[in-house]
Amino acid sequence: MDVPGFPPDLAAGRGSLAAAFERTQARFLVISFSSDWLYPSYQCREIVGALRGLNRDVAYVDLESYYGHDSFLVDVAEQSQIVTGFLANTFEKIR
């Protein structure tokens, strides 16, 4: 895909990933797929590193998959369990 600015650069105009997230207060769940060529795992780990550097609450999982960028559409069961657990844990923390 040859679209200018795609995939988006989160640090664009902010100087760094850390600067892009410095005002956040949310919990984060970052899920990557080993075969994703559009949003590769190393980029997701960079986001996680920036969030952890800011002492943000972030969970990360890299799922093994063979379906490239479409993995999130195909490998639904495992990621559904992860998202469900993350949301349940988040709900418990805010109660």
Image (cartoon, helix red, strand yellow):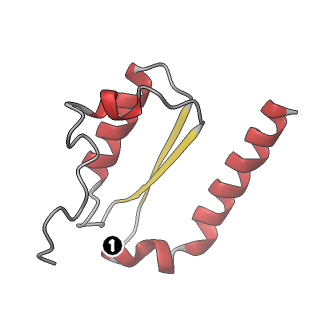
Look at mark 1 in the image and give the residue it sits on: 69
Find residue 45 and report its horizontal and vertical position in percent: 33, 41
Most foreground residue, 34 or 48:
48
As drawn, the residue found furthest toward the front would be: 13
The amino acid type, in three-letter code, at marker 1 is His
Q: Quadrant of residue 53?
A: top left
Q: In which quadrant will I find the C terminus?
A: top right
Most foreground residue, 95 or 83:
95
Residue 50 position (above or below residue 67) = above
Kindly state the secondary structure of the residue where label 1 is placed: helix
Most foreground residue, 60 or 7:
7
Residue 88 position (above or below residue 19) = below
Residue 53 position (above or below residue 65) = above
Tell me which residue sits at (63%, 55%) in the image: 82
As drawn, the residue found furthest toward the right would be: 95
Find residue 59 and report its horizontal and vertical position in percent: 54, 39
**Image-based side of 4 in relation to 93, left or right:** left
Q: Quadrant of residue 20?
A: top left
For the residue carrying disc 1, how many other residues have a C-alpha within 10 Å: few (<14), some (14-19), or many (20+)?
A: some
Residue 8 position (above or below residue 89) = below
Tell me which residue sits at (21%, 65%) in the image: 6
Find residue 88 and report its horizontal and vertical position in percent: 78, 47
**Image-based side of 81 in relation to 11, left or right:** right
Q: In which quadrant will I find the N terminus?
A: bottom left
